[in-house]
């Protein structure tokens, strides 16, 4: 079954940023051809997005999506007691605990991130209420 929304283009085979740009361009053209047609767009850069994921909530969401508890348990063990250090001009810093986020460079991390943000689209499905009117929202994630 398909779990990831069509709006999520990043890190998926057969999808790209071009798809999101094409969709946005189509929406703008369609709306601007309508009398009094308006388009409001906002762009959010999820800076350091991989670093900010709440792992407990990620594991909860994976189980809710039907991922086996055994697999989630393996993931939990992979993410237990992670430490890191940073290289500076003076050498490596002391190790520090990393309690949130998914591993940088891990092939599984993009999928985990996608599953984590996937239901963000549902939050906007009925539009956003501004004052007394509701505005339709199209979410394009890349």
Image (tube, grey):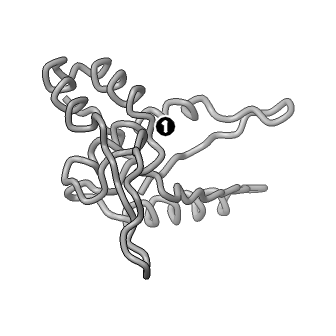
User: Residue 39 appears in which quarter of the rendering?
Assistant: bottom right
> In this orientation, which residue lies closer to the viewer: 50 or 41?
50
Q: From the viewer's perspective, is 86 left or right of 33?
A: left
Q: Residue at x 30, y 50 (%)?
A: 103
Residue 22 located left or right of residue 79: right
The residue under the point 38% across, 65% down is 17
Residue behind mark 1: 121
Percent position (x, y) of residue 120?
50, 36
Residue 57 against residue 114 in the figure, above or below? above
Quarter containing the C terminus: bottom left
- Residue in the picture at 35% in, 54% down: 84
Please tell me which residue lies in front, 138 or 26: 138
Mark 1 lies on a secondary structure that is helix
Report x, y in % for residue 95: 37, 54
Task: Judge by depth and name the residue closer to the eye, 100 or 125.
Answer: 100
The quarter of the image holding the N terminus is: top left
Residue 139: x %, y % from top left: 52, 47
Q: Residue at x 16, y 20 (%)?
A: 68
Q: Outermost residue toward the bottom?
A: 89
User: 110 and 23: which one is in front?
Assistant: 110
Task: Give how far across and how far down residue 53 sits, in percent.
Answer: 44, 41
Q: How many marks?
A: 1
């Amino acid at each position: 079954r398909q779990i990831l929304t069509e709006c999520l283009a990043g890190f998926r085979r057969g999808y790209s940023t071009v798809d999101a740009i094409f969709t946005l361009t189509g929406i703008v053209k369609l709306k601007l051809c309508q009398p009094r047609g308006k388009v409001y767009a906002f762009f959010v850069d999820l800076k350091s997005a991989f670093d900010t994921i709440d792992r407990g909530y990620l594991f909860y969401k994976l189980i809710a999506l039907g991922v086996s508890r055994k697999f989630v348990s393996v993931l939990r063990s992979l993410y237990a007691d992670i430490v890191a250090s940073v290289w500076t001009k003076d050498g490596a810093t002391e190790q520090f605990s990393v309690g949130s986020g998914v591993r940088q460079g891990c092939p599984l991390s993009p999928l985990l991130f996608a599953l984590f943000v996937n239901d963000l689209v549902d939050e906007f499905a009925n539009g956003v209420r501004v004052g007394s009117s509701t505005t339709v929202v199209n979410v394009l994630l890349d």
